[in-house]
Amino acid sequence: MASSNHEILILGGGFVGLFTALHLERLNCACPRTMIDRNWRFVFKPLLYELLSSETNTEIIWPRYDELLSERDVAFVLDEVSNIDLDNKQVTTQAGLTHSYQYLVLGLGATTGYLNIPGTKENTLPFRDGQDTIVLSEHLRKNLQIAAQRSDQKHEARSQHLTVAIIGAGPAGVELAVTLADLLPEWYEPLGGNPTDINIVILQRGQEILSGLGNEKLKKAARKAMRKRGVNLLTGASVTEIQPEQVIYEQDGETRSLPASTIVWTAGTAPNPLIQNLSIPDEHKNRQGKLRVLPTLQLPGHPEVFAAGDCALNPSDDLPDTAQVAYQQGKAIADNIIALIEDKAPTPAEVSLRGTLLKLGKGESAAEIFDKIEIKGHPGHLIREATYLSILPLPGYKLKTGVQWLTEEIFEQFSALPL
């Protein structure tokens, strides 16, 4: 079996993995570094909606790893990890390669979780990466074309082609719904269709939307944006089955159905199977299978292994699974790897939650800063774009030295704009 020996091995090229690699470069790390990911491109998940709507250049949101890392002394391997052997410090891939390591970074993220609801995996579209976005775009355009060619305005099948059901009213579901509410009329009207026939529905099991966000002002802004765009929000709607082009759900004690040719699943995630199958004591995982890490983001019993992002949790500092958290965790991991190389003690990761950015339609967002200030509409959109673009690891650009996420400079730049 072929093998290679790399001192620092990074599994997963999401925010944790990629920014660990980039911060190691900024720290002038001399150790060989290899990053393995099963995808060819990095996906900037907070801007997937812009990829769908073409509001931002595709190469910015969905750049290739070889281009990102070409001048950064990081080897990129396009492969899928099949086994992680913590005892022997080796990782095996589906291509039959064995990679040894001195330090290991687990940034494998999460996978789509379907909550054991029958038919969900087979009959819904996920929305987690760039390829999902391309598939969804093509699917929607196809259904709009079919609907436009049906002359019978009362035809039930025509209405079904114009209905988009989004399962889950978390940030992904809400942001996708309002984006589609602005985007689909622009696609449909040139085909001769009536944009008011488009029906976008969110089904939420509970009564609350954006349950991961504590800011009530943002929730209010999101509800207002949905009402303005005619998005139908069904709360208390517990999905029991997904059939081909039909959602079966229970609401108010009754079983109901929603015909929809497009059904998007945003309601659940599950830990990566590689994380669930790691040979570690059960007490080092939570009930969902996430790794319980130390404040330094090290795996208990394996100080050479770091984990963060969607696949791990720090019991002493419960943080949301968001890009701004993973970005800062990547920096903390890089700092601690350098500390270990220099025979110094690693330090607890310090993550600062400076605010929340929420897309509320094309060219419109809400930016909540430091739990005090809320900026909505186009100024909020400008802050959201400036914040994300300030950390994008564009090819040929040096990584910024600070954790620039909702910085005072960005706020000051746009706070004077009329609201």
Image (cartoon, rainbow, N blue to C red):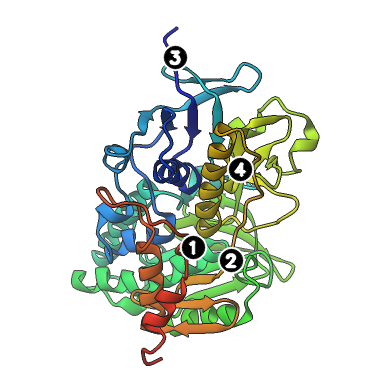
What's under tag 2, amino acid-wise?
A: Leu
Above or below — where is 169 with respect to 90?
A: below
Q: Residue 160: percent from the left, percent from the top?
A: 41, 63
The answer to which quarter of the image holds residue 86 is: top right
Q: CA distance from mark 2 to mark 1?
A: 32 Å
Name the one closer to the observer, 275 or 18.
18
The mark found on residue 353 in the picture is: 2
Q: CA distance from mark 2 to mark 3?
A: 41 Å
The residue singled out by tag 4 in the image is: 311
Q: CA distance from mark 3 to mark 1?
A: 41 Å
* Residue farthest top in this picture: 1
> Which of label 2 and label 1 is nearer to you?
2
What's under tag 3, amino acid-wise?
A: Gly
The residue singled out by tag 1 in the image is: 165
Mark 2 or mark 3: whose residue is earlier in sequence: 3
What's under tag 1, amino acid-wise?
A: Ala
The mark found on residue 50 in the picture is: none
Mark 4 or mark 2: whose residue is earlier in sequence: 4
Above or below — where is 124 with respect to 415?
A: above
The residue singled out by tag 3 in the image is: 96
Q: CA distance from mark 4 to mark 1?
A: 28 Å
> Which of label 4 and label 1 is nearer to you?
4
The answer to which quarter of the image holds residue 380 is: bottom left
Instruction: Indicate the secondary structure of the residue bearing disc 4.
Output: helix
